[in-house]
Amino acid sequence: MADISKINDRLFGDGVERTSEPGPARRVRIDSARIARMKAIFETAARELDGVEVWLARDLQKLLGYTEWRNFQNVIAKAKESCGRAGAPTEDHFVDVTRVIGKGKGAQERVPDVALTRYACYLIAQNGDPQKDPIAFAQTYFALQTRKQEVLEERIAERERILAREKLSHTENELSGIIYERGVDERGFGTIRSKGDAALFGGFTTSDMKRKLGVPQTRALADFLPTVTIKAKDLAAEMTNYTVKTSDLRGERRISRQHIENNLNVRQALVSSGIEPEYLPAEEDIKKVERRLKSEEKKLTQGLTGIPGPD
C-alpha cells in the first residue's frame, strides 16, 4: 500500500498542519479533480476484516490530517460515545487489532490499532472540524457510503419480499389447480385458504387479518405481509400441495383439514422462534414497492449506451 502520509500531503497540501493550527478557519472550495483523487485514496485505504470493509485508525488518522496518535485516540473515544448513544453496539464498529509497522533498517514493531467500519469512520469524521478539507470530505464520503449500505440492504430486503410474494402466488395457483381436479371449485379454494390463515394467525381468518392490518378487503392479504409471514404461508401451501398429490386427497373437507394441519405446524415453528404472525405489523403495499424499484431501475438505465456493433 502507498505511503498514506505522503499521499495526504499531495492531496491536501498543508492539510496535516492546518488541522491543529489555531486561529480562524478558512473554507476552500475543493475542485472536482481533487475530489476524485480524495475518493480514490479513501477507497484504496479500505481493507477487509472477516468479510467486512474497514479502515484502520492509524491510516485514517493520517488521511484526516492528525499528526499525533494520542490526539486521534481522543477523537475515537468521542466517536465511541456517539455510537453508544445511537444504540449501536460499539464492539461491532470499533475492533481492537494489532498491526506491524516498519521502523527502518528492516526493524519492525507491533502497535495497537483499531479496525473501523464505515459507520465508525463517519462518527469520527463528525467529531472533526468541517472547516478542514480532509475532514469535510470524510464527513460527506462516509455519510454517503453509510447511506449507500443502508439503501442496498433495504433494496435487497424489498426484492426478497417481492420474490417471496411471487413464489406464494405460484404455489397457490398450483394448489388451486390441483384441488380443482379433485372436486373443489374456486369458492371452495377461498374457504380452504381462509381456514389455513386462521390456523396460521392464531384464530384470525383472512378477513379478520385484513381488518386488523388495515388492508382493503378487495386486496390480497399477502400484499401487505412481511417476508417471514409470506414464506410461512408459502411453506404451508407447498406442504398441502405435496400431501394432496401423494395421498390423493379429494373433496373440500379432507383437503381443508390437511391445510389447517399444515398451517398449525408452520405456526408452531414460528411461535417456537418467538414469532407470532398475527402481531407482526403490516408492510408497505408490495405493488408500490414493485413500482418504486422499477422506477429506480429505469432511472439507472437512462443515458446509458450499449456497446457499438460492428460497422
Image: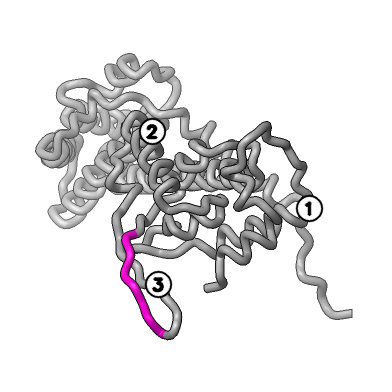
Nearer-the-camera pick, 73 or 55:
73
Q: Looking at the picture, which amino acid does disc 3 mark?
A: Ile
Residue 140 at x, y percent in the picture: 60, 42
Task: State whether residue 282 is above or below residue 127.
Answer: above
| Dot 2 alpha-carbon crowd within 10 angstroms: few under 14, some 14 to 19, many 20 or more | some
Residue range (magenta)? 106-112
Instruction: Please report the residue visible at 66 percent of the width from the left and 45 percent of the height from the top.
Output: 133
Q: Earlier in the sequence, mark 2 or mark 3?
A: 2
Most distant residue in the right direction: 311
Display colour scheme: one colour
Q: Is residue 40 left or right of residue 311?
A: left
Instruction: Please report the residue visible at 27 percent of the width from the left and 17 percent of the height from the top.
Output: 208
Q: Which residue is mark 2?
A: 82
Residue 117 at x, y percent in the picture: 41, 51
| Dot 3 alpha-carbon crowd within 10 angstroms: few under 14, some 14 to 19, many 20 or more | few
Q: Which residue is mark 1?
A: 303
Q: Is residue 191 left or right of residue 288?
A: left
Nearer-the-camera pick, 281 or 11:
11
Nearer-the-camera pick, 126 or 58:
58
Q: Is residue 73 visible?
A: yes
Q: Which residue is mark 3?
A: 101
Q: Quadrant of residue 4?
A: bottom right
- Alpha carbons under labels 3 and 1: distance apart: 47 Å
Q: Quadrant of residue 53?
A: bottom left
Instruction: Please report the residue visible at 32 percent of the width from the left and 37 percent of the height from the top.
Output: 88
Residue 245 magenta-highlighted: no
Task: State whether residue 125 is above or below residue 211.
Answer: below
